[in-house]
């Protein structure tokens, strides 16, 4: 069995004392020194990994004041603080070995929307897309666009002065900040806004920190104006962090906000902001131009910008090819057709207008130019996407570029450290040519994309940071890029802040760097706020890019074979796509329901990596231990597991318990597998973890009940009345709760085989399949049973057969066999492999007849192409299609009659289905349309049931919370109309349990319409 893991760093006693004193002084948020939380927040989207000592989750500004005041007391003046929002920074901005102050959990309210005057007031933990969703009904939006907009917080945007696509039109975050509320390190709550001269004079008279800060900055503006003009480049992406060039704004007003924006939390703790918002463009289009080379795309951009484009984004062939392998491609493929030679680069050229006529006039000019010039400038074709829906799908692909690059196969992965350089746009093509030469000289591959209109290109060199020799390239390449940016009059830090890369600041600023040090000293005399970044007080040292611990250094401890065995969890690059705020998006329900970052794919992957590292340091091979467990069976080591479980109940520490707590919250919905750009597969590595964890500790009885469900259902189904009576009795419900289960479904009481035989349908036996005539075989299909439909929703299975017969097909029923999905979910991997192997053999024998196989429940059916393929190999996994996939392939065989449009239906797809088989919803729509019916789809998050998750006692409240976040409003809107459909058994079960509404399956709606036509 695996050992108990106790050799982990504990928090410094100073930080324990700080936490205790904070509580005594009335801190109302949460404080955590747990190793799990500290591990999860030890990374961001950079190459670095730094464990904090303590994490604070303040509830409000008063909590921030308590933190600031206490940290200023003499005994705590060596303590470090760093604010954190979404944790999406690429340069370690929010990493610290001190206290992480995470405002995203509680301080995430939109406080005020003034649509008339076009401004909003928000707390710093509000997510950008959350804000824009609230503004949309007013026709407004917060402009600075980010690829991480569904998880990046406003506070994080302010602290990095964030910008992205469209910055030439909309500027940076700072350009939209009207007022800021900041807690200074002496506990002062300071409200900053542009100041008239009389207001500035009055503030300078103050004898506190506020007064001294304003006196210093005003003096720098007066005394160093010439040097500032010389050192600060004239770029769209002007310098962020202590922006001396904008101490006074365009109207000549003193504006402290221009210093605070981009300061990365080194000057104060921003807790509230008043922001300017803009009207949403009424009409938009994207012209997608393909090129024979990436260099051609870069050199053609100025000519396209001259056509009054709102923005131009560039993507190279590496990103484009990775997008083809991702769920995102399904929605954009029509705009990127295959050329004779694959495109090596694309420009996405955006046009905006207030009317469709105006937009079409702009597009006509573009079309004329591109048509007349043909293949000039390396162009090889273009398409036009019109309307917000199509445009947003393409921007969605572009936003995913960072994550897509992380999905390159192998140990070498594209990493951020020189990815946001900015040069004058007219220099970009020549600069990138030399950049590529530099990377080629080191033998390094790379991916490129970015904001060609602003002269900012994101370049991610492909490096294996677990290799000490390759790690040295970070220094060599960065030094080379710094020299190139100087040559081309640009910046190393064009968009994503300085962070660890601040070490290059003194050389860049020259004599002005001492002024930055003066500013830091006035705000933070003891160098406590995010020290080592942007600037230090005089005498302090900046961090160095190769002197901060990296993830690769920690991961290289794990043997290669173990890394390969847990490959689905070890390549998380921290992009944070799983932190998506949107309750109507499937990713990730446990994060949305708990707001605990360890309950996310990124959190669980971080914990897995650290758990494997600790096992490796203990000399344990988890793969060998898994093999041993499967060979010895459940009884071996029983007494040891009992002893360890009793010790656990007594409070004996083991890091595995902290990992287990995070793994238990996973719904195994597999949205991470479909939506994570690097394809982190939590259910897969979770199952491997559970197998090993329960090799050391006793399993709960409920796991055995759920794991054996598929094998016991055929037996208890012989006495359905007795089973249902026992389960539905008071004693039965009490016993279920005792073992950790609630609301268990009742058997339908129908024998599916007998009932189908009575209706004239046959079993798919080898003999029956051999007797099929050629014409009959051409219209035959084998329905693969799943336990949930066959025994709990038998009527649905019967309706499927009736529908297929009505459509002119010959359905046959595959004999029931366990699928094994419940075994896999609960980590019975040895048993799963046996069940999967046996079932796959049966299904392959049926498929050998040439008759296609289809499944009804999405989750169970998709197991054949995912878990089976991993356990048995792709060739051994049987091909079982989703019902709609098969029907969509047979549209030509459907009856040529229109049933009638009616009022249409609305589909709520299963999470696993819509994220792992993205064409599935569209397939249903094709089938409905072929029969003259309308079917739309609603965006929803998870219903909260996820197989048996919602039936487990300790998960029921979270399950109901998730249902209330997304599904409840859709069900309520349809109440009494009967037009809402759901494909998942667990989804329909949840709706009936909570709202008492019985949703139909799409096939049942089709059958009803056909019968009534």
Image (cartoon, rainbow, N blue to C red):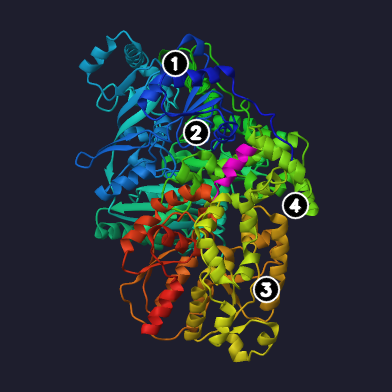
Bounds of the magenta segment: 657-671
Image: 92 above or below 818: above
Image: 906 above or below 327: below
* Mark sitting earlier along the chain (3/4): 4
Q: CA distance from mark 3 to mark 4?
A: 29 Å
Mark number, residue 843? 3
- Please tell me whether mark 4 or mark 2 is closer to you in this view: 4
* Mark sitting earlier along the chain (1/4): 1
Packing grade of label 3 (10 A; few <14, some 14-19, many >=20) is many
Answer whether residue 750 is magenta in the image. no
* Mark sitting earlier along the chain (4/2): 2
* Mark sitting earlier along the chain (2/3): 2
- Please tell me whether mark 1 or mark 4 is closer to you in this view: 4
Mark number, residue 634? 4
* Mark sitting earlier along the chain (2/1): 1
Disc 2 is placed on an element classified as loop
Label 2 sits on residue: 488
Quarter of the rendering occupied by the N terminus: top right
């Amino acid at each position: 069995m695996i050992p108990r893991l106790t050799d982990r760093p504990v928090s410094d006693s100073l930080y324990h004392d700080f936490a205790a004193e904070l509580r005594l002084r009335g801190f109302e948020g949460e404080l955590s020194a747990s190793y799990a939380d500290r591990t999860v927040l030890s990374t961001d989207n950079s190459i670095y990994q730094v464990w904090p000592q303590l994490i604070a989750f303040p509830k409000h500004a008063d909590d921030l004041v308590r933190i600031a005041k206490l940290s200023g007391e003499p005994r705590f003046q060596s303590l470090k603080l760093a604010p954190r929002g979404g944790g999406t920074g690429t340069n370690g901005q929010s990493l610290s070995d001190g206290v992480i102050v995470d405002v995203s959990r509680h301080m995430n309210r939109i406080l005020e929307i003034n649509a008339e005057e076009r401004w909003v007031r928000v707390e710093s933990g509000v997510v950008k897309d959350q804000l824009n969703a609230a503004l949309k009904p007013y026709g407004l939006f917060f402009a600075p666009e980010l690829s991480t907009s569904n998880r990046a917080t406003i506070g994080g945007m302010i602290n990095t002065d964030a910008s992205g696509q469209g910055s030439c039109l909309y500027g940076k975050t700072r350009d939209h900040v009207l007022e800021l509320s900041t807690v200074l390190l002496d506990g002062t709550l300071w409200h900053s806004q542009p100041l008239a001269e009389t207001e500035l004079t009055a503030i300078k008279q103050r004898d506190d920190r506020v007064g001294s800060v304003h006196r210093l900055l005003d003096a720098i503006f007066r005394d160093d104006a010439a040097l500032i003009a010389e050192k600060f480049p004239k770029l769209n992406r002007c310098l962020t962090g202590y922006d001396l060039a904008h101490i006074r704004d365009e109207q000549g007003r003193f504006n402290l906000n221009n210093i605070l924006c981009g300061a990365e939390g080194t000057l104060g703790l921003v807790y509230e902001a008043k922001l300017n918002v803009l009207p949403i463009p009424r009409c938009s289009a994207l012209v997608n131009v393909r090129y024979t080379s990436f260099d051609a795309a870069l050199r053609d951009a100025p000519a396209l910008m001259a056509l009054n484009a709102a923005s131009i984004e560039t993507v190279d062939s590496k990103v484009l090819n990775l997008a083809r392998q991702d769920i995102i491609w399904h929605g954009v493929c029509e705009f990127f057709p295959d050329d004779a030679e694959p495109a090596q680069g694309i420009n996405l050229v955006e046009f905006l207008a207030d009317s469709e006529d105006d937009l079409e006039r702009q597009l006509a000019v573009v079309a004329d130019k591109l048509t007349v010039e043909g293949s000039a400038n390396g162009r090889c074709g273009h398409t036009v996407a019109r309307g917000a829906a199509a445009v947003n799908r393409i921007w969605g692909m572009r936003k995913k570029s960072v994550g897509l690059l992380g999905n390159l196969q192998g140990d070498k992965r594209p990493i951020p450290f020189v990815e946001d350089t900015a040069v004058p746009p007219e220099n970009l093509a020549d600069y990138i040519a030399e950049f590529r030469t530099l990377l080629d000289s080191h033998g390094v591959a790379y991916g490129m994309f970015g904001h060609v209109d602003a002269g900012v290109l994101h370049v991610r060199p492909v490096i294996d940071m677990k290799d000490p020799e390759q790690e040295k390239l970070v220094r060599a390449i960065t030094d080379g890029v710094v020299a190139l940016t100087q040559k081309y009059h640009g910046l190393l830090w064009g968009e994503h802040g300085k962070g660890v890369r601040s070490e290059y600041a003194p050389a860049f600023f020259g004599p002005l760097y001492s002024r930055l040090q003066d500013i830091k000293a006035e705000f933070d005399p003891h160098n406590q706020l995010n020290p080592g970044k942007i600037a230090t007080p005089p005498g302090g040292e900046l961090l160095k890019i190769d002197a901060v611990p990296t993830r690769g250094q920690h991961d290289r401890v794990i043997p290669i074979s173990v890394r390969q065995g847990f490959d689905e969890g070890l390549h998380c690059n921290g992009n944070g796509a799983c932190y998506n705020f949107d309750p109507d998006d499937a990713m990730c329900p446990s994060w949305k329901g708990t707001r605990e970052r360890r309950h996310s794919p990124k959190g669980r992957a971080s914990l897995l990596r650290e758990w494997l590292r600790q096992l490796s340091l203990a000399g344990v091979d988890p793969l060998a231990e898994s093999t041993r467990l499967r060979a010895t069976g459940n009884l071996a080591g029983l007494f040891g597991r009992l002893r360890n479980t009793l010790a656990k109940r007594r409070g004996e520490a083991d890091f595995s318990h902290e990992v287990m707590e995070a793994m238990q919250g996973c719904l195994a919905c597999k949205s991470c597998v479909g939506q994570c750009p690097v394809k982190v597969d939590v259910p897969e590595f979770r199952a491997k973890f559970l197998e090993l964890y329960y090799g050391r500790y006793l399993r709960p009885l409920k796991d055995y009940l759920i794991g054996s469900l598929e094998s016991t259902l055929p037996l208890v189904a012989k006495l359905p009345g007795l089973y249902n009576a026992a389960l539905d009795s008071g004693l039965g419900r009490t016993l279920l709760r005792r073992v950790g289960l609630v609301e268990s479904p009742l058997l339908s009481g129908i024998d599916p085989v007998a009932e189908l035989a009575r209706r004239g349908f046959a079993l798919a036996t080898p003999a029956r399949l051999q007797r099929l005539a050629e014409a009959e075989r051409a219209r035959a299909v084998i329905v693969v049973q799943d336990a949930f439909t066959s025994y709990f929703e038998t009527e649905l299975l019967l309706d499927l057969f009736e529908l297929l017969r009505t459509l002119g097909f010959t359905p046959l029923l595959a004999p029931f066999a366990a699928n094994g999905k419940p075994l896999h979910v609960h980590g019975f991997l040895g048993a799963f492999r046996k069940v999967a192997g046996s079932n796959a053999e049966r299904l392959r024998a049926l498929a050998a007849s040439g008759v296609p196989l289809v499944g009804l429940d999405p989750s169970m059916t998709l197991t054949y192409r995912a878990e089976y393929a991993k356990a048995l190999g792709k060739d051994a996994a049987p091909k079982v299609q989703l019902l709609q996939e098969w029907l969509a392939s047979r549209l030509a065989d459907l009856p040529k009659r229109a049933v009638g449009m009616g009022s249409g239906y609305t589909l709520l797809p299963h999470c696993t289905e819509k994220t792992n088989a993205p064409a599935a919803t569209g397939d249903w729509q094709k089938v409905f349309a072929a029969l003259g019916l309308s079917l739309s789809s609603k965006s929803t998050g998870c219903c909260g049931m996820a197989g048996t998750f919602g039936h487990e006692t300790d998960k029921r409240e979270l399950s109901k919370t998730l249902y209330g976040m997304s599904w409840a409003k859709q069900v309520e809107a349809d109440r009494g109309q009967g037009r809402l459909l759901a494909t998942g058994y667990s989804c329909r079960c949840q709706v009936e349990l909570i709202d008492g509404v019985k949703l139909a399956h799409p096939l049942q709606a089709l059958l009803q319409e056909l019968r009534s036509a």
